[in-house]
Image: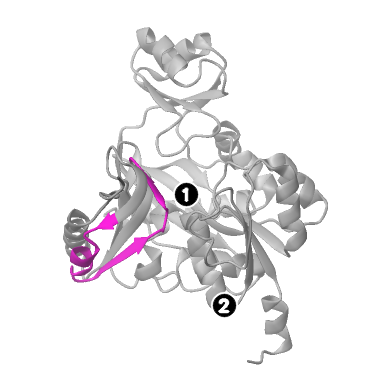
Amino acid sequence: MTYNNKDTDFLKKRIGIIGGGQLGQMMALEAKKMGFYLIILDPTPDCPAHSIVDEHIVAGFEDKEAIKRLAEKCDLMTYEFEHINTEILLQLENSGYKIYPTAKSLKIIQNKLTQKQTLAANSLPVPEFMGVDGREDMLKAGEKYGYPYMLKTCTGGYDGKGNAVVHSAADTDNAYNELGGGSLPLMAEKMIDFKMETSILACRGLNGQVVIYPVGNNIHKDSILHETIVPADIPSSAVEKATKCARDVMEVFQGIGMFCVELFITKDNDVLINEIAPRPHNSGHYTIEGCVTSQFENHIRAIVGLPLGNTALIRPTVMVNLLGEEGSDGKARVYGLYDALAVEGAFVHIYGKSQVKSKRKMGHITVTAENAADALSRAELAYSKITIREDDNNG
């Protein structure tokens, strides 16, 4: 196999990924299609990305020496989630190591309060919010926003963890104690009476090129994403506002790679930014089969400096998450794969996690069809056929 000099320069690049879960796995699959050398850092020896990559540093995400070792082995690093020690990443970045999205942007985004403050300071639309330092501030938030309002931990929350609804002044102590009783920094946010929760994916390359994906309608169960329907059934005016938000976010944070902007669509079709994720996102899994270029391929293209791919939707698409069955805790086994794949247009992705736990993300289903209604009905049919739970033969 031969390449011209320019291609050879790209393919010599060694990519490091912090995290070897399903997002790291899907990044790695796309990077391998293009011939890149990959090294991951993950504490789990048999994590989903392990069998795909060239090297695996088995270490914790707070292990500064291990992260430094990864940086020294790579030409550039990326990551699959936000909850990383940014202190070591900033040190490495300041020493000349390439990290995308940047450690500087990650430090702002991984704290929900500084994230919202940065968005508000740049005139991007966000719900009303305030920092909370104890119960007294919670009562002030109730006076300011009314009840109920949302209390959030500023760091560490995901899939509904780190959120508590404050229903009344009498509920203050319960919510405060539920979120650590002052052990974690907190913020309060006005409750939004939204019509729809959506997300929009954006990708920015090293040369400043930005591409935007379609808006997806996100439906949650127990605060965990259940399904994403694309395109979202919202007016073109709301699509335009969401697209502008995505472009503005990429400029504010000078993002390199994939960003997901989660949005509320209000009753009058305005948009408010809920949260930002500086990485490929669960709600973007539909792009693998649904779009010309997946979010994972564009992420790799962006961080190595290749041209970004077409983000157009090929056909209406629905993605449904496959979670560990309620009560499961043990060796994972998939039941019903044959029947799920018998549904027309269904694609099943199993992440290869060896252990299943209740509501743990274990895979997803994607269905494309001529219209969103058909895609949704087929996706829900396929979903009804498949279960991931503890192996019946576990003992």
Kindly identify the amino acid type of the residue bearing the numbered disc 2. Met
Sequence-first tag of 1 and 2: 2
Residue 335 falls left or right of residue 266? left
Local SS, label 1: strand
Magenta stretch: give its range. 334-358
- How many residues crowd around disc 1 within 10 Å: few (fewer than 14), some, or many (20 or more)? many
Residue 260 falls left or right of residue 146? right
Q: Position of residue 353 (x, y in %)?
A: 42, 53
Residue 212 falls left or right of residue 106? left
- In the current view of this chain or complex, which residue is farthest to the front? 395
Residue 57 sits in quarter: bottom right
Residue to which mark 2 is pinned: 34
Please tell me the numbered disc located at residue 261: 1
- Residue 93 is at least partly visible in this image: yes
Q: Position of residue 245 (x, y in %)?
A: 49, 50
109 relative to 52, above or below: above
Local SS, label 2: loop
Q: Quadrant of the N terminus?
A: bottom right
Real-space Cα separation, disc 1 to disc 2, in angstroms = 27 Å
Please tell me the numbered disc located at residue 225: none
Q: How many labels were placed on the picture?
A: 2
The residue sitting at 35% across, 17% down in the picture is 147
The residue sitting at 46% across, 29% down in the picture is 162
- Residue 280 is at least partly visible in this image: no
Residue 327 sits in quarter: top left
- Asked if the magenta segment contains residue 355, the reply would be yes
Q: Quadrant of the C terminus?
A: top left
The residue sitting at 73% across, 58% down in the picture is 98
Q: Position of residue 229 (x, y in %)?
A: 29, 56
